[in-house]
Image (tube, rainbow, N blue to C red):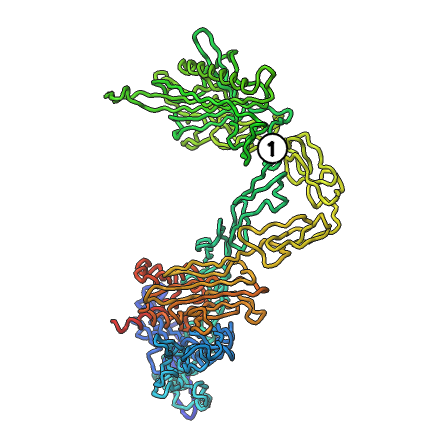
């Protein structure tokens, strides 16, 4: 064996320790193999202890921050000592550790224990409109000469001239109140203090208490009859200012020369340091142990290699602190924040996109949300202005809408008009003569043909074009259907070729004679309406044909089939009613004045046509009763009704005009038609189009040569239209280029527009005014005047975004511009004052919000709450230009008089939110902008609440902690949260609509703690 002796002398004391190390020789007795109980997890140590293996056994040692025998460990409450864990303000014990926190208005020092004053004025001027003065633990706003501080303690109100009102008022310069002035009902004034202050005996001054900014003390505040008294935590001494605490110099010298009593003998062996002196040399918490002192650090700090010093942990360096977006390290902790367009969830880590589209009045028409932003879109025929609003485009202001004659603007669209004797072309812009048929075009015909073979009458209705089918409500064997062929005359429509378009002019008798009209009705007993393709074709019989064969004469037929059940006789008792089908035919035939002769005038022609129509009606009646009436559409023959005994067996198809899609019947879409033989919808072939759904045929394109796209949905999709810079008589090929000095920007036109003013173009086929050789190039905001050949600024109410144009565009809707020469639609502004004024909730907003408000505008709003209710207002943010001396002003006061008590007044941008109560029961709100300014403006919500809650509401909105953090500020900017809070304030019973979980998910914990403490204090007298 070897014996070693260790002698240690320290500060005049000598301790002798004998430490024996026994080293067994290799030839010693053989021992059994040791079992590591800690590794095998068969120890009996506490979950809060560390297991240390020993020879043939193990021992348990409680972890730092715990005490006990190792088998039973309990948390050490570092905060329960007089030392308060070393925290100068608040110490929060947590399992195995602790955390120091500071009062509002202070921040944690780098040692994790001391608290230093926060300079609120260094960021955003503390939210003060004019002057911010920092103080220990707090700050206060002040105003310049000529202004007084409003009740919200942040904004300033311009003081009116003295002597404008009899008696003392709160608007007087020397009203005497230190903080808040109230006008009483009897005409006097009374004074109040801000939260954390007490009104003194003179009922004017306010005395500071420890409840506001810790009474101005850095460490400890104690209430006395003379006001707060400051003292310091151990290790610190009070500065001569009576508020600040500094390190104890005497204590520091002792720390550098420790006394000898700081060492004790541990057991028979180790003398060691003790926490009783110099805190064991630890920066933070010191623990005495069998091996000496052991230092530990509070949460948010880490022990350095010297095992004494604590250093702040920069949580943001590791995985961004768990923050989704921005991580800002603070002493002993960190803070997460989000980018614009996102909000921080209550876990204070996750950022969630703000769905602006879920807000009320986000966009006039469509809203498309995106990550961190959103976009407003408008219906066709409207344009976006003011970021969120949609206004009708005045197409007529853009080169008269491209119309040849006249242009009428409508909401979301426009219409071209024609002079008497003309009608609108199919392109809806050009005008053509009524009786003139362009060569090569076939007029649509509805031809009625009847033939007789023996006693059998056979009639057929052939629809060459413009067949319109309307099925009943049921797609399978409908009880009603309507089929029209051709085009009606004198029904508010103008027709050319195979196209019929609405017109604003009726035809004159001199131009076109009224048609012959006849209506006939036929009954078929025990039959049912059933439009279906005829299975076996019939050879077309040659017979009499109704209607002149000239192209310009149009025949129109409207057939309606309706089935219903009626009892046999009025008093029939037979429950099985028989089916009765009624077919109604409206016939219309044209009489052309040009067909008159010397022997037969116009009246004679009409009589002949009327006689011929009546003859066909008789034949029709017989053919229908004999089931020998057919309709020919798109080369197929259809029957309109069937006798019930001969009715076809139940069909699996959906019927004419329908097809089956995914197990259900749907109408044939525009651009397609129902193919009777294939019993399905097929696309319109080239050279045809179909605008409507559920049709039996497609219409021919004008001048169709069988070319064009498949499935055309409208006539503008037909092939062969003249391209830009070209024109023709009908708008279709063959086309010729626009002559020099003219241009054409549209497809399918019959004319070209002259440049005007004798201007020419460089070449034929010009497609824009840009091609006209002007004498000067006009910039945006101007148009070229062809009379004087110079650029003219766009008048007020118009704008032009492009270079080299000969027109200005009218502002959309009810908007106008501030000045002439506007270059963008964003300069078009609505001058109407916005807002909704309700008794319980409402809002006001500047004109054109969220776009810039117009110059030289004035708005007046009045809030008149019901009896026994007060007004609370939240200004989330307000944007007013600050370039001039208060050119734009928002003021809230009791009435229009400048001497009436004022609640709020500002002429500056204020991005930090603020909430305040009105100083009067009613509010008169006025906003003015001067002739030169414009800015985004404001949207300000308000709520009226029961006056019984006045003390609670004012206590909340005047507390600086409401605005202390970005998270709290975002609450007052969150439209949904404000709406929810206002809902509860206006109607307290609505509180029960929101569960505790919903409240916790909507609001940060710090905000809930703030509100809860206020509510508890308010309700305490009633408990």
Q: Quadrant of the N terminus?
A: bottom left
**Dot 1 lies on which element?**
strand
- At a point 44% along the width and 77% down the height, the residue shown is 165
Total numbered badges shown on the rendered structure? 1
Does the rendering let one see residue 309?
no
Q: Nearer the viewer, residue 602 or 374?
A: 602
- At a point 68% along the width and 43% down the height, the residue shown is 768
Q: Which residue is mark 1?
A: 422
In the figure, is residue 155 to the left or right of 820? left
Q: Quadrant of the C terminus?
A: bottom left
The quarter of the picture where residue 816 lies is bottom right
Residue 541 in the image: above or below residue 890: above
In the figure, is residue 45 to the left or right of 435? left
Residue 524 placed where, x, y %?
37, 18
Residue 804 in the image: above or below residue 320: above
Residue 561 placed where, x, y %?
41, 23
Mark 1, other Cα within 10 Å: few <14 / some 14–19 / many ≥20:
many
Q: Nearer the viewer, residue 245 or 740?
A: 740
Residue 764 placed where, x, y %?
74, 38
Residue 53 placed where, x, y %?
36, 69
Does the rendering let one see residue 221?
yes
Which residue ends up furthest to the left in the rendered image? 573
Which residue ends up furthest to the top in the rendered image? 454
- At a point 72% along the width and 38% down the height, the residue shown is 765
């Amino acid at each position: 064996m070897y014996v070693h002796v260790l002698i240690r002398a320290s500060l005049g004391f000598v301790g002798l320790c004998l430490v024996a190390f026994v080293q067994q020789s290799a030839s010693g007795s053989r021992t059994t193999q040791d079992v590591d109980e800690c590794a095998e997890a068969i120890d009996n140590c506490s979950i809060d202890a560390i297991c240390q293996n020993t020879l043939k056994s193990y021992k348990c040692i409680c972890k730092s921050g715990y005490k006990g025998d190792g088998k039973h460990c309990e948390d050490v409450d570092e905060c329960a000592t007089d030392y308060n864990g070393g925290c100068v303000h608040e110490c929060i014990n947590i399992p195995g550790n602790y955390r120091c926190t500071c009062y509002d208005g202070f921040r944690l020092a780098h040692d994790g224990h001391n608290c230093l004053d926060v300079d609120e004025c260094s960021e955003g001027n503390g939210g003060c409109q004019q002057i911010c003065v920092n103080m220990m633990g707090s700050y206060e706003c002040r105003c310049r000469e000529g202004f007084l501080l409003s009740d919200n303690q942040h904004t300033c109100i311009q003081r009116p001239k003295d002597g404008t009102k009899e008696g003392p008022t709160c608007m007087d310069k020397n009203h005497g109140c230190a903080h808040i002035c109230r006008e009483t009902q009897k005409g006097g004034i009374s004074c109040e203090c801000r939260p954390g202050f007490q009104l003194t005996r003179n009922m004017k001054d306010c005395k500071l208490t420890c409840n506001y900014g810790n009474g101005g003390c850095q460490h400890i505040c104690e209430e006395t009859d003379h006001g707060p008294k400051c003292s310091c935590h151990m290790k610190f001494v009070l500065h001569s200012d009576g508020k600040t605490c500094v390190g104890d110099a005497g204590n520091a010298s002792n720390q550098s020369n420790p006394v000898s009593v700081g060492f004790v003998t541990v057991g028979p062996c180790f003398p060691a340091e003790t926490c009783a002196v110099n805190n064991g040399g630890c920066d933070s918490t010191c623990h005495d142990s069998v091996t000496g002192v052991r230092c530990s650090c509070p949460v948010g700090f880490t022990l350095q290699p010297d095992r004494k010093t604590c250093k702040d942990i920069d949580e943001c360096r590791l995985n961004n602190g768990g923050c989704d977006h921005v991580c800002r390290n603070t002493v002993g902790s960190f803070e997460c924040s989000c980018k614009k367009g996102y909000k921080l969830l209550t876990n204070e880590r996750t950022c969630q996109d703000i769905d602006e589209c879920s807000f009320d009045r986000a966009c006039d028409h469509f809203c498309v949300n995106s990550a961190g932003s959103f976009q407003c879109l408008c219906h066709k025929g409207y344009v976006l202005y003011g970021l969120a609003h949609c206004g009708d485009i005045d197409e007529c202001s853009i080169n008269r809408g491209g119309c040849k004659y006249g242009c009428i603007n409508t909401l979301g669209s426009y219409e071209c008009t024609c002079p008497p004797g003309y009608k609108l072309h199919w392109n809806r812009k050009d005008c053509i003569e009524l009786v003139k048929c362009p060569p090569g075009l076939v007029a649509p015909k509805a031809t009625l043909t009847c033939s007789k073979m023996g006693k059998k009458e056979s009639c057929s209705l052939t629809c060459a074009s413009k067949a319109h089918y309307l099925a009943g409500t049921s797609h399978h064997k409908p009880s009603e259907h309507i089929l029209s062929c051709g085009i009606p005359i004198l029904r508010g429509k103008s027709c050319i070729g195979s196209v019929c378009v609405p017109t604003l002019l009726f035809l004159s008798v001199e131009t076109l004679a009224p048609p012959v009209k006849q209506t006939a009705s036929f009954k078929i007993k025990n039959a049912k309406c059933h439009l279906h393709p005829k299975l076996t074709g019939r050879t077309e019989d040659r017979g009499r044909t109704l209607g002149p064969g000239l192209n310009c004469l149009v025949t129109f037929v409207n057939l309606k089939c309706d089935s219903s059940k009626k009892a046999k006789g009025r008093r029939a008792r037979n429950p099985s009613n028989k089916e009765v089908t009624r077919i109604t035919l409206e016939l219309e035939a044209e009489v052309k004045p040009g067909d008159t002769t010397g022997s037969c005038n116009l009246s004679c022609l009409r009589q002949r046509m009327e006689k011929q129509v009546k003859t066909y009606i008789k034949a029709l009646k017989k053919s229908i009763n004999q089931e020998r009436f057919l309709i020919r559409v798109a080369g197929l023959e259809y029957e309109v009704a069937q006798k019930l005994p001969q009715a076809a067996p139940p069909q699996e198809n959906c019927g004419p005009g329908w097809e089956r899609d995914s197990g259900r019947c749907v109408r044939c879409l525009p651009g397609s038609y129902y193919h009777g033989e294939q019993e399905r919808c097929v696309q319109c072939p080239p050279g045809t189009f179909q605008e409507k759904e559920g049709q039996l045929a497609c219409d021919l394109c004008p001048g169709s040569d069988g070319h064009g796209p498949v499935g055309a949905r409208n006539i503008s999709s037909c092939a062969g239209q003249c391209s830009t810079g070209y024109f023709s008589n009908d708008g279709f090929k063959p086309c010729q280029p626009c002559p020099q000095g003219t241009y054409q920007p549209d497809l399918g036109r019959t004319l070209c527009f002259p440049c005007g003013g004798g201007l020419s173009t460089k070449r034929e086929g010009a497609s824009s005014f840009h091609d006209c050789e002007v004498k000067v190039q006009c910039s945006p905001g101007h148009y070229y005047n062809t009379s004087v050949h110079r650029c003219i600024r766009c008048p007020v109410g118009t704008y032009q975004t492009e270079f080299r144009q000969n027109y200005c565009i009218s502002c959309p809707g009810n908007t106008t511009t501030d000045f002439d020469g506007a270059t963008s639609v964003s300069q078009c502004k609505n001058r109407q004052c916005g807002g909704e004024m309700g008794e319980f909730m409402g809002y006001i907003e500047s004109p054109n919000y969220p776009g810039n408000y117009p110059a030289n505008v004035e708005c007046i709003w009045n809030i008149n709450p019901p009896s026994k209710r007060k007004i609370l207002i939240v200004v989330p943010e307000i944007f007013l230009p600050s370039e001039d001396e208060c050119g734009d002003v928002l003021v809230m006061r009791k009435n229009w008089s400048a001497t009436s008590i004022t609640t709020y007044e500002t002429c500056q941008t204020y991005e930090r939110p603020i909430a305040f109560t009105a100083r009067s029961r009613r509010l008169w709100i006025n906003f003015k902008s001067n002739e030169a300014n414009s800015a985004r403006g404001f949207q300000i919500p308000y709520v009226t609440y029961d006056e019984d809650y006045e003390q609670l509401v004012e206590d909340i909105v005047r507390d600086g902690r409401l605005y202390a953090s970005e998270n709290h500020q975002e609450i007052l900017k969150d439209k949904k949260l404000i709406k929810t809070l206002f809902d509860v304030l206006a109607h307290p019973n609505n509180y029960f609509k929101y569960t505790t979980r919903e409240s916790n998910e909507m609001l940060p914990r710090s905000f809930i703690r703030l509100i809860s403490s206020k509510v508890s204090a308010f309700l305490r007298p009633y408990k």
